[in-house]
Image (cartoon, rainbow, N blue to C red):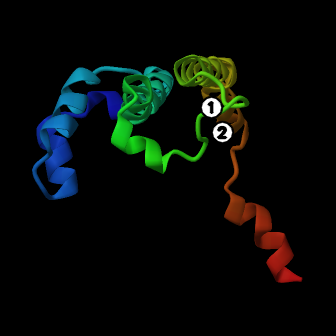
Amino acid sequence: MPGNLTVSAAEAGLGRPLSWAESLWVERTAGWSPYEMHISLIGVLLAAYICVNTPFLLVQCLNISWLEQYRIQKAGPKAQDGRTAVLRCITTILGDLFALFGPLAVTAFPIFQVSKQRQSFSSINCLAPLNKA
């Protein structure tokens, strides 16, 4: 079971030493069930999204003058206020991530587990009658 993995077993399986982030992940998730690991992917997804967008948000909010020449949408009467527009965009996307991936992550794993248990035959045995014809 993946929850019983240790750092030494992971290093032996990979054939190389783990990085500090990998070993931290293995130590923190030791004993977790597969469903808990699956649910934790929501947090990883949100953390990655926030970490990737934070530099862009800071550049937008700080209004660094020498970066203005590289802006796609120049300041003008139709341009929205940068700070509020960026903040609204990020909160909308985070809300969409929660609304879409939250229920999907919570329901997908049990659905796959149930469908895997109901299929007692392998896909190769299923296709065998087709190959004989």
- Measuring 50% from the left and 22% from the top, which residue is drawn there? 39
Q: Quadrant of residue 18?
A: top left
Labelled pair 2, 1 in contact (Cβ < 8 Å): yes
- Measuring 32% from the left and 27% from the top, which residue is drawn there? 3
- Measuring 73% from the left and 31% from the top, which residue is drawn there? 78
Answer with left or right where residue 131 lies relative to residue 94.
right
Where in the figure is residue 30, as x and y percent of width and height?
Answer: 26, 24
Q: Given the image, on which type of amino acid does mark 1 rest?
A: Gln
Q: Secondary structure at mark 1?
A: helix
State which quarter of the image contains the N terminus.
top left
Answer with left or right where residue 34 lies relative to residue 123.
left
Residue lying furthest front in this view? 77
**Circle 2 residues within 10 Å: few <14, some 14–19, many ≥20:** few
Could you say which is closer to the camera, residue 47 or residue 13?
Answer: 47
3D distance between C-alphas at marks 2 and 1: 5 Å
- How many numbered tags mark residues here? 2
Mark 2 = which residue? Answer: 116
- Vertical placement of 119 versus 98: above or below? below
Residue lying furthest bottom in this view? 133
Where in the figure is residue 36, as x and y percent of width and height?
Answer: 45, 20
